[in-house]
Amino acid sequence: MNLLRNERGLTLIEVMMVVIILGILVALVVPQFTGRTEQARTAAARADIDANIAMALEMYYLDNGIYPTTEQGLQALIRKPDSPPMPMAWNGPYLKKNSKLKDPWGEAYVYRCPGENNPKSFDLYSLGPDRQKGGDDDINNWD
């Protein structure tokens, strides 16, 4: 019954070496991916502002001759507004009904019509990751 004597396990030093090697590998690999999440969120917000929501607003404009007012907001792309000015030929929804109209950081997109920066159309922007107006990380449709 000396079967266990011939079996050899890992020594404490061998286990520590494996842990150290894994730690070094993690230290080299993790920094490569940490910035990617924020880049992906920024790209998603840019796509919403420049394409998805902007295209829906343009379709609304083509149908009705006006953009939704600031008061009607982006919800006018999902439900027909019930406050003036009433859209004459609302043909929506222009966005999917389950659209959250929130940026990737969980904040509502800011919509103004007429816009301060685009007085003949609309301003659409996200406050970005810092959630503060006017930061360098804001994503908008006028830059």
Image (cartoon, grey):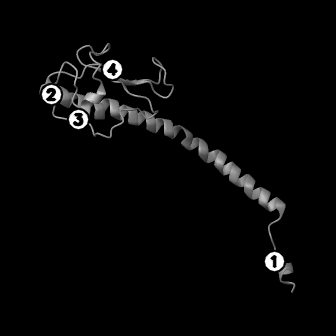
User: Picture coordinates of residue 142 (x, y %)?
Assistant: 33, 20
Distance from the alpha carbon under mark 1 to that under mark 2: 79 Å
Q: Nearer the viewer, residue 14 or 73?
A: 73
* Mark found first going from the N terminus, 1 or 2: 1
The residue at which mark 3 appears reads as: 94
* Mark found first going from the N terminus, 1 or 3: 1
Q: Outermost residue, front direction? A: 82
The residue at which mark 2 appears reads as: 62
Q: Outermost residue, left direction? A: 89
Which quadrant of the figure has residue 31? Answer: top right
Q: Residue at x 60, y 47 (%)?
A: 29
What amino acid is at disc 4?
Trp
Q: Is residue 34 left or right of residue 42?
A: right
* Mark found first going from the N terminus, 3 or 4: 3
Q: Are marks 4 and 1 in contact (CB under 8 Å)?
A: no
User: Picture coordinates of residue 83 (x, y %)?
Assistant: 22, 21
Q: Nearer the viewer, residue 92 or 30?
A: 92
Q: Is residue 121 left or right of residue 140?
A: left
Distance from the alpha carbon under mark 3 to that under mark 4: 22 Å
What amino acid is at disc 3?
Tyr
* Mark found first going from the N terminus, 3 or 2: 2
The residue at which mark 1 appears reads as: 7
Q: Element under label 1?
A: loop
Q: Nearer the viewer, residue 120 or 9?
A: 120
User: Picture coordinates of residue 20 (x, y %)?
Assistant: 74, 52
Q: Residue at x 26, y 37 (%)?
A: 95
Q: Which mark is residue 142?
A: 4
